[in-house]
Amino acid sequence: MCDFGAQFVTLFYIVNDLYKEWVSSKVGDIAERAIIKIAITHFSYEDDLYEEKCKEIILEHCNSTNDVRDYSLLFSDCKVDINKDANFITEFMESRAGKK
């Protein structure tokens, strides 16, 4: 799937709870980058409305063997609250992506 298509499907899952099985499945590098990009973008959206779904998506993909390096965006712009998201941060840092 192309970048735009993967972003669109991921957004549909985050906002409307559709296509979870696709978003959670193993995909190629381009689609995975798009999925992670949308999850990070919506991580701290309006009163943390989508935070739990975004955490779920990120943790599902952070052990992937795809070469995705976009996770640094998660730790910029104060998206992650070190106190509130401590468990998420720990799980992420113990993953394959956290060790890169």
Image (spheres, rainbow, N blue to C red):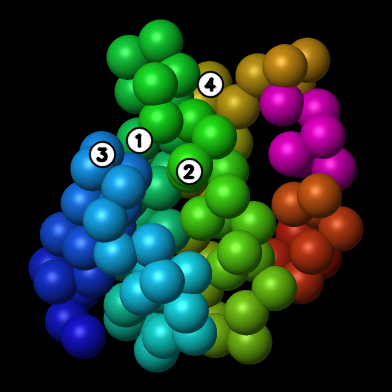
Residue 54's tag is: 2
Q: Which residues are magenta?
A: 85-90
Asked if 14 appears above or below 78 in the picture, the reply is below
Name which residue type carries label 2.
Cys
On-image quarter of the N terminus? bottom left
* Badge 2 or badge 1: first in the primary sequence: 1
Nearer the observer: mark 4 or 1; the answer is 1
Determine crowd level at label 1: few under 14, some 14-19, many 20+ residues with C-alpha closer than 10 A.
many
What x and y, as percent, mark residue 22?
Answer: 36, 74
* Badge 3 or badge 1: first in the primary sequence: 3
Would residue 61 be counted in the magenta stretch?
A: no
Would residue 87 be counted in the magenta stretch?
A: yes
Q: What secondary structure predominates along the stretch shown in magenta?
A: helix
Name which residue type carries label 1.
His
Position of 95 with respect to 61 (left or right) is right
Position of 74 with respect to 13 (left or right) is right
Residue 15's tag is: 3
Circle 4 is placed at which residue position?
78
* Badge 4 or badge 3: first in the primary sequence: 3
